[in-house]
Amino acid sequence: MKRRNFILIFFILILLTFVSMVGQAQLKVEVSEAVELMSILSRTAGFEEYSKDLAGQYTKDTEEWFVAYREHPVIPYYREIRAKYGIGYEKVMNMAVHLEIAKGKVKLIGNKADLNDEWQNVNLDEFIALLNKFYNDTRFHKFFEQHSSFYDEGIKEYERNIMSMIHQDWYNRFYGTEAKELFHIIIAFTYGDNHNGVHRQLEGKPREAFAIMGYWINRTTWDATLLIHEFNHSFVNPLLDNAANRAMMEKIGTKMLQFAQPAMERQDYNKWEIVINESIVRAAVYIYLKDYNLVSRGTVYYMMEEVWHKGFQWIPELVGCLRDYTTQREKYKTLNDYYPEIAKCLTKYLNNEGNRIQNALR
């Protein structure tokens, strides 16, 4: 081999290694002052999903510090818009990732149109003004700084227990497409055992996907399935942006929502689109776990929990459907190509259940 060619190959290998390292560096675990601010505001206002006492001393510190501010001017306003527009769960986190805190001031960033529908009717100028007053009156930044070592240890624990089980390349292979988003993992230390995926698009920057992961102590291994779940959303949700997919799924999704409405409402899944996306994501999680030999007794329990308590009775059928997809990749290059088969699978499930009920009533 000529020396010049050897040197060229050598530098290409160095470049590829560097690119790989940069890609890995992008996927890091973080804490966000804005996420903690919105979480603690929600807890102080009495939002149930932000009031779980799972963070030990941090929960106690939060209670002691903010108990005096339960009637702060922002609190009745915040409770009112929750009651009026359904602000809660991921809607709170959607706002959090659109906030920037700098030099003692909280400001809204990005386009208002990128916020959830629930925020569209809120007077955002008024809300941000009251939020700033809460931030300064409570000396929130001081509270946040005083717990920096706690946040750091929580992040290290998550990295030790979870990140080795996250394989980003699986998503591109399984879905047949590449992610067009920049991923972030944020530990929400006041969010208990909840988790959400939210997005942000800032002008002139790549679209960003945030996996907001709740925190709880006294658990030796944080549940990797939660993070695996949230990354799947970045590939599954855009499939419904396809007009043909949306047209074939609307009737199916509406029936599924009606079929398990009480369970879905408890999880704040109040739209057919959410039910469709959550169903496909949950089924994809099991394919991932199987591919990496991560199926265990805990995984079986997790599926039973999804089916019996969370209302996703069709998950076993949908897992089988996605397993068939993995064996037909010559025919179906992407999950989008396979989407009509998913629609057929869910239609068959609904018809079978309907027939089973009718037979029982004869």
Image (cartoon, grey):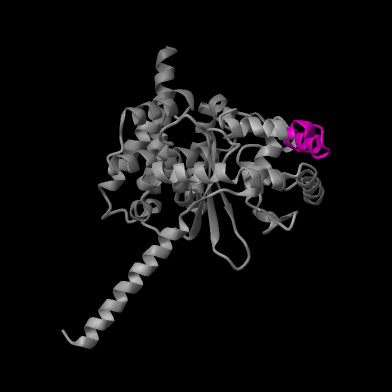
Residue most extreme to the top: 362
Give the side of residue 315 with respect to residue 5, left or right: right
Give how far across and how far down residue 123 sits, in percent. 80, 48
Q: Residue furthest left?
A: 1
Q: Quadrant of the N terminus?
A: bottom left
Where does the C terminus fall, quadrant-wise? top left
Can residue 162 be seen at all in this image of the molecule?
Answer: no
Residue beneath the point at 58% across and 27% down: 266
Q: Position of residue 357 (x, y in %)?
A: 43, 18
Q: Which residue shows up at 56% across the image and 27% down it?
A: 261
Residue 1 appears left or right of 331: left
Region rendered in magenta: 66-83
Residue 92 falls in which quadrant of the image? top right
- Is 259 in front, or is 292? 292
* 78 part of magenta stretch: yes
From this view, report whether residue 247 is shown above or below residue 192. below
Question: Vertically, is 209 above or below 302?
Answer: below
Residue 271 vertical placement versus 325 (above, below): above
In-image side of 63 versus 9 (left or right): right
Front residue of 356/236: it is: 236
Chief SS of the magenta region: helix
Q: Position of residue 329 (x, y in %)?
A: 28, 53
Q: Position of residue 12 (x, y in %)?
A: 31, 76
Kindly identify the residue that appears in the image at 36 percent across and 49 percent down.
Answer: 338
Q: Residue at x 42, y 62 (%)?
A: 23
